[in-house]
Image: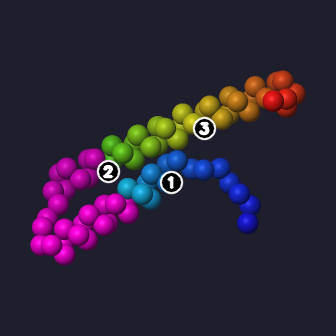
Amino acid sequence: MRRHRFDVFSFVAGGLFTVLAVLFLIASVNGHQLNGRIVLPVAFIVLGAAGLIGAVVAVARRRSAAQDDRRGGEG
């Protein structure tokens, strides 16, 4: 299998959904309820931040690759 670049957004999204699922599972087992008015906006904020970080990392990699190409692949 071929290696690929680490995808920050997918990693954060998967982790966030896993944490949310575990929280809802624990709350339902214990007879509690999670307030969706807090959980959902926080989830969207985290996903949005991860998307921004992923975009910034992608731009930085492209710039680095372009500079390496201009230098002839040195470094």
Q: Which residues are magenta?
A: 17-43
Q: Which mark is residue 43?
A: 2
Disc 2 residue type (three-letter): Ala
Label 1 environment density (alpha carbons within 10 Å; few <14, some 14–19, many ≥20)? some
Identified by mark 3, the residue type is Ala
Marks 3 and 1: in contact by CB < 8 Å? no
The mark tally for this picture is 3
The residue wearing badge 3 is 58
* Above or below 72: residue 36: below
Reply yes or no: does residue 26 show up in magenta: yes
Residue 3 placement: quadrant:
bottom right
The answer to whether residue 49 is left or right of residue 63 is left
The magenta stretch spans residue 41? yes
First in sequence, mark 2 or 3: give its number: 2
Kindly report the distance in space between the C-alpha atoms of the residues bearing marks 2 and 3. Answer: 22 Å
Kindly indicate whether the residue at mark 3 contacts the one at mark 2 (C-beta within 8 angstroms).
no
Amino acid carrying mark 1 in the image: Ser
Q: Position of residue 1 (x, y in %)?
A: 73, 66
Quarter containing the C terminus:
top right
Disc 1: which residue: 10
**Disc nearer the start of the sequence (1/3):** 1
The x and y percentages for residue 34 are 17, 60
* Residue at mark 1 to residue at mark 3: CA–CA distance: 14 Å
Judge by depth and name the residue closer to the eye, 26 or 33: 26
Question: In the image, what residue occupies the spot 85% across and 31% down?
Answer: 73
**Kind of element beneath mark 1:** helix
User: Residue at position x 52%, y 47% from top?
Assistant: 8
- Residue at position x 14%, y 65% in the image: 33
